[in-house]
Amino acid sequence: MNSIGEDCNELKKQYDACFNSWFSEGFLKGKTDDSGCAPIFRVYQECVKRAMREQKIELREVGTEYSTGSEYDNANSAAGKGQQKSKS
């Protein structure tokens, strides 16, 4: 898959290769330090942000809030309780 900005495609390929190497040769063997790919990720990220500005895509339009599994479980648990109450 190509990047959002054509100028970013090569950077994306470099980052993808770095990530895939880290994942298979590091993470799957218990090494969780992913800082080796951080420099190329920062450059790629800046390229993507620039492409988004050029295409007039605002980050808040595509932003998503992510939560940890426990926050997700708590939210679903609370929602489930609300649904149970409404059934009574």
Image (cartoon, rainbow, N blue to C red):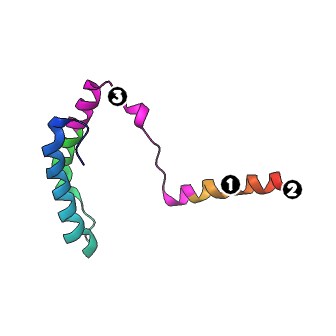
Picture quadrant where residue 47 is located: top left
Q: Main secondary structure of the magenta part?
A: helix
Q: Which of 67 and 24 is in front in this view?
A: 24
Circle 2 is placed at which residue position? 88
Q: Which of marks 1 and 3 is nearer the N terminus?
A: 3
| 21 drawn magenta | no
Q: Which of marks 2 and 3 is nearer the N terminus?
A: 3
Above or below for 29 versus 51: below
Circle 1 is placed at which residue position? 78
For the C terminus, the image quarter is bottom right
Above or below for 87 versus 63: below
Q: The disc labelled 3 sits on which kind of residue?
A: Ile
Q: CA separation, marks 1 and 2?
A: 16 Å
Q: The disc labelled 2 sits on which kind of residue?
A: Ser
Circle 3 is placed at which residue position? 57
Q: CA separation, marks 1 and 3?
A: 34 Å
Specify start and end residues of the magenta stretch as a single range: 46-72
Instruction: Find numbered disc 2 in the image and state the secondary structure of the residue it sits on.
Output: loop
Instruction: Find numbered disc 3 in the image and state the secondary structure of the residue it sits on.
Output: loop
Q: Earlier in the sequence, mark 1 or mark 2?
A: 1
User: At 26% across and 38% down in the image, what residue appears?
Assistant: 4
Q: Which mark is residue 49?
A: none
User: At 20% across and 54% down in the image, what residue appears?
Assistant: 16
